[in-house]
Image (cartoon, rainbow, N blue to C red):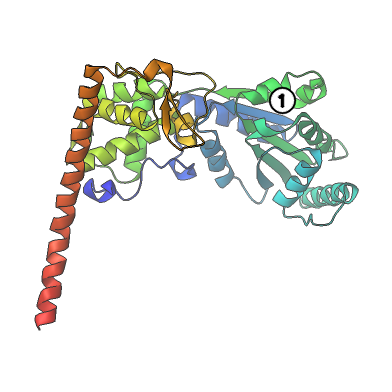
Amino acid sequence: MYESFYRLTGKPFQLSPDPAFYFGSRGHKRAHAYLEYGLYQGEGFIVITGEVGAGKTTMVRNMLAHLDSTKLVAAHLVSTQLDENDLLRAVCGAFGLATKGTDKASLLAELEQFLKNVAAERKRALLLVDEAQNLTLRAVEELRMLSNFQVGEHALLQSFLVGQPELRQTMQRPGMQQFRQRVIASYHLGSLDRSETQAYIEYRLKHVGWKGDPTFETEAYDAIFAFTGGIPRRINLVCNRLMLAGYLGEIHTLAASDVEAVVSEIKEELGVVGKDGSAQSKENSPQNELNSEAGLNDAEDLDPQTDQITATPASRHVSAGDIALRLARLERTLGLVLNLMRRLVHAIEPVEKDTNQHTRQ
């Protein structure tokens, strides 16, 4: 909706990973360098970890998009809870091999022959496993066994494992010593700092033709960084909502107060606003996907029997100040909705006028 208002050619802050929007922060460049080092070595495992929404998948897809297909045959596998047998089938499927109705011994033989054929063409096979924290210990061990395929002294398969910090915990488990010995490099991808957060926002905007409209005040960048902690997907979440609010309010300069209003609305929608208007925290409470991506905790639960929101003891008392705060926010939301309705009416009127004239003719 806001793209045309701000004269953009596309959506700058979509939540799904898109390699076209890859932003090379210091951390991302370092992680990318580890991946390139792994490609140069041509064997073993490279392990990249990072928090949810840190940009791991975007970085990986960007790397895959720039691989030389004349030298590498790459397969991208997004892992779920796979045991060793399911993993083997998934790996074969990722390389385009038939897996239906085939036993494990046959799958292994077919995969080995495929890898030998790749090597005979003077190419290398690369397996990239995303969301690798979901692998079971047996599945990780199966990957290690696949790395034993070789011709002479040359390994036939190299693997990159990309996942959340739990992957490192898996690597440190008892019995994983042989796997750890095959890891030639590992790196943990952190969040963006304050300056990188601003550069990240402006990079994505420029990618869709941003010419400075809207303008972000310095304090707005500060507020975005304070709420998101420099996690790219959280930044996308906040900025997408901020641009939408700017469009509805016909705002061309976004201030810290606009960011704070959007953040407050997100917190309210997710049930995290307490009696003083601040976020409330409750450990181990069930969260929906948007909540976890925003890095928020809830103060209210959804009753599975009634589908109604039930307040926790900490949020049952509602003060007069809280009521006034919520009324003010409701008034602001209604104002934005009315403004949108007026703009829609103005857009429809010319169409109706032309239709009436055509009817009379």
Q: In this image, 169 relative to 19: left or right?
A: right
Q: Residue 176: x and y, percent?
A: 79, 22
Mark yes or no: residue 354 visible.
yes
**In the rendered image, the vertical position of residue 196 relative to residue 147, given as above or below:** above
Q: Residue 273: x and y, percent?
A: 34, 23
Q: Looking at this view, is 321 or 266 the one in front?
A: 321
**In the rendered image, the vertical position of residue 337 relative to residue 232, given as above or below:** below
**In the rendered image, the vertical position of residue 198 relative to residue 98, given as above or below:** above
The residue to which callout 1 is attached is 184
Q: Residue 134: x and y, percent?
A: 67, 33
At x 64%, y 24%, the residue is 166
Mark yes or no: residue 249 visible.
no
The residue positioned farthest toward the bottom in the image shown: 361
Q: Looking at this view, is 262 or 314 the one in front?
A: 314
The residue positioned farthest toward the front in the image shown: 306
The quadrant of the rendering that contains the C terminus is bottom left
Q: Looking at this view, is 79 or 217 the one in front?
A: 79
Q: Identity of the amino acid at label 1?
A: Ile
